[in-house]
Amino acid sequence: MTRLYGDYAYSHGPIAACHWADAVPDTDLAAPPAKGAIRTHTAVIGGGYTGLNAALHLAEAGVEVTLLDAEFPGFGASGRNGGFCCLGGTRATNRQLAKHGDPKDVRRAEVAAIDHVGALLDRLGINADRQQHGEAIVAHTPAMAAHLPDLARNFAEDYDCEPQVIAKEDMAAHGMAGTWHGALSVPLGFSLHPRKYAAGLARAAQAAGAQLHGQSRVTRIAQENGKLVLTTPDATITADRLILATNGYSVETVPDWIRARTLPAQSSVIATRPLTQEELDAQGWTTHQMAYEDRRLLHYFHLTPDNRMVFGQRGGLIASAANDARIAERVRGDFARAFPHWAHVETRSNWSGMVCLTASLTPFCGAIPGLPGAFSAFGYHGNGVAMGSYLGMLLADVSRGETPRSILPAAFAAPPPRFPLGPLRQAWLAAEYSWARLTERSA
């Protein structure tokens, strides 16, 4: 087994109807395949936010860098996510994080990750449809609503911000009318267009001198004479340093160390046509703030600048065209229940992709044990727009032996252990999803 899911998960099928591709088609992200013998200082495997950030910052530092992607830069989660640049990256509690140092370091890094992406958009002049409205956590049950004041205190302490609890009867006044029982508005984070951001990063990395290659799947990594030698179908790349940035799209044997250290989990998204003002008013959901439910099988959603509702959900276990269609129908049904006045609205766009979990519940960022000169970052737990970008930037420093330019929490330094059950580790997801369905009542 080289990947946890079937071939369909890594094909173009799951993004055939991706809304983000309307503005940035696959051809705009395409890069030529690597060919022949290539000598470079740093090779980067993976052209998502982590790899592109690493390549950009290395090239800006004058390092010769070659990026290789099996399809095209932005093909994976970076080109198909829900568009949330927000807090997150870890599922660990403060108590769990305290085993590795000050939990506040992780919370500061989460805020720094958002700031990093915002600063990049400004510095590079990337127009990614940013909407700087923060994020709302909506309560899907009365019990969750009762917990919001405690959650507000936790957010205030962890992130040095001033969140606002919104009672159910006040949600309509905040443009949040719907089936929820209250909300917590957090003034951190922003939504964006994932592919516009990825395309901007790719252009900037190339302008800085990085060489980007698509259709260049790395099938083997070896060490020869103190160098790292990478094999693709049409090229052999010899490098002094290597950055592995494949996250939920990792191959279990490239390198073997990565085997069973990631647990990809499917996330599925739909997008409506642009909603009219009359439709927005009828439903009463007019805010452009990002929103999500604080539960295992969560929904996450936001209005785009042209008033399309992007609505996603976790929970798929089988990768196939038929199952994608079934999940899209399920998501569509949940969307109609959440926003009954929009039940008639067309949702022609639907797509899916992989987020990446770790057994440590935290991201990893550091050297790959047993492979001198190789480094990696992965495991953003569904919040990779900010954290994946941030750790890619820090890998550029770590791989050069430099002190990281921003905070790198100690909790991220220890390589995550392998998941039990190896190739059968999806059973952990199946158990978690089953428990969630038994204990969490849908909105």
Image (spheres, grey):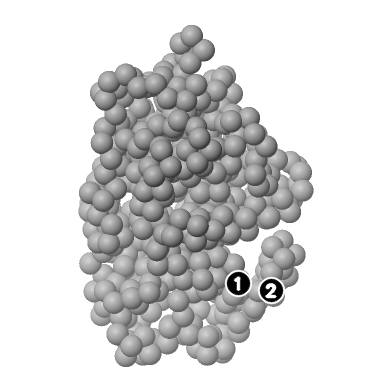
Q: Residue at x 60, y 84 (%)?
A: 167
Question: Which residue occupies 70% across, 40% down?
Answer: 410
Q: Secondary structure at mark 2?
A: loop
Q: Residue at x 47, y 59 (%)?
A: 121
Which residue is pictured at 57% across the width and 80% down the height? 182
Precedes in sequence: disc 1 or disc 2: 2
| In-front residue for pair 364/92 | 364
Position above or below: 282 against 266: below
- Using residue 301 as the reference point, say whether residue 343 is left or right of it: left
- Relative to 423, residue 167 above or below: below
Q: Residues within 10 Å of mark 1 (few under 14, many from 20)?
A: some
How would you rate the neighbour count of disc 2 (Cα within 10 Å): few for under 14, some for 14-19, many for 20 or more? some
Quadrant in which the N terminus is drawn? top left
Q: Amino acid at mark 1?
A: Pro
Side of 391 relative to 5 (left or right) = right
For the view shown, which residue lies furthest in the top direction? 225
Rendering coords of residue 209 (x, y %): 41, 38
Q: Secondary structure at mark 1?
A: loop
> In which quadrant of the rendered view does residue 399 lie?
top right
The answer to whether residue 442 of the structure is visible from this angle is no
Q: Nearer the viewer, residue 381 or 409?
A: 409
Q: Position of residue 213 (x, y in %)?
A: 32, 35
Residue 103 location, x and y as percent? 73, 51
Vertical relation: 11 (above or below) 306: above
Q: Position of residue 148 (x, y in %)?
A: 65, 73
* Mark number, residue 162: 2
Residue named by callout 1: 187
In contact (CB < 8 Å): disc 1 and disc 2: yes
